[in-house]
Amino acid sequence: MAEPRPLYSPEERRRRDQSPWTVVQGILAPVQFAVFLASTALVVRFLLTGQDEGLATASIVLKTLLLYTIMVTGSIWEKAVFGRYLFAPAFFWEDVFSMLVLALHTAYLIGLLGGMLSVTELMLLALAAYLAYLINAIQFLLKLRAARLQQARQAIPQGLIA
């Protein structure tokens, strides 16, 4: 069975390791995830109790702004590493799903700013956006884990592999 194409070529790995955008992504991703967890709790609390609508709304807006930030910086990172801003073959499906995540978060902001949805509808839309975000985060984590395992296998001398 042929070994799948590595996520990074040696040159792409070098560019990834030298790019300051790798550090930026490494900082923004866990910050965004922490805000996602807190915001999810606030949204669910609001839906269950009706309390702290403003706090829940502010947390969704903050999460959305962080998403936009990580998407812009992630596109710059992808350009630095793979030579294109989006849809590099290594992250094609993750980027495709990211577009859905962006669309749902943007729909929330449009609904909020345009007064087009009730508060409950906005909160449910936020939860849909958060579910899409969670799926996308899992996609990226699985991809990066596979890349680490592949890199570790490549580091083992061929004579030692049974």
Image: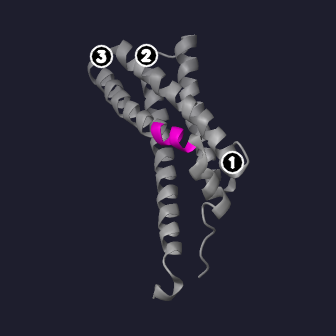
Most foreground residue, 52 or 17: 17
Q: Is disc 3 surrounded by few (<14), some (14 to 19) or many (20+) residues within 10 Å?
A: few
**Residue furthest to the right:** 83
Badge 3 or badge 2: first in the primary sequence: 3
Three-letter amino acid code of the residue under disc 2: Val
Three-letter amino acid code of the residue under disc 1: Phe
Disc 3 + disc 2, Cβ < 8 Å: no
**Residue furthest to the left:** 49
Identify residue for label 1: 87
Three-letter amino acid code of the residue under disc 3: Gly
Badge 1 or badge 2: first in the primary sequence: 1
Where is the N terminus found, in terms of image quarters?
bottom right
Where is the C terminus found, in terms of image quarters?
bottom left
- The stretch of residues the image draws in magenta is 22-27
Identify residue for label 2: 119
Q: Position of residue 110 (x, y in %)?
A: 58, 18
Q: CA distance from mark 3 to mark 2?
A: 10 Å
Q: Residue at x 53, y 23 (%)?
A: 108
84 displayed left or right of 126: right
Q: Residue at x 28, y 15 (%)?
A: 51
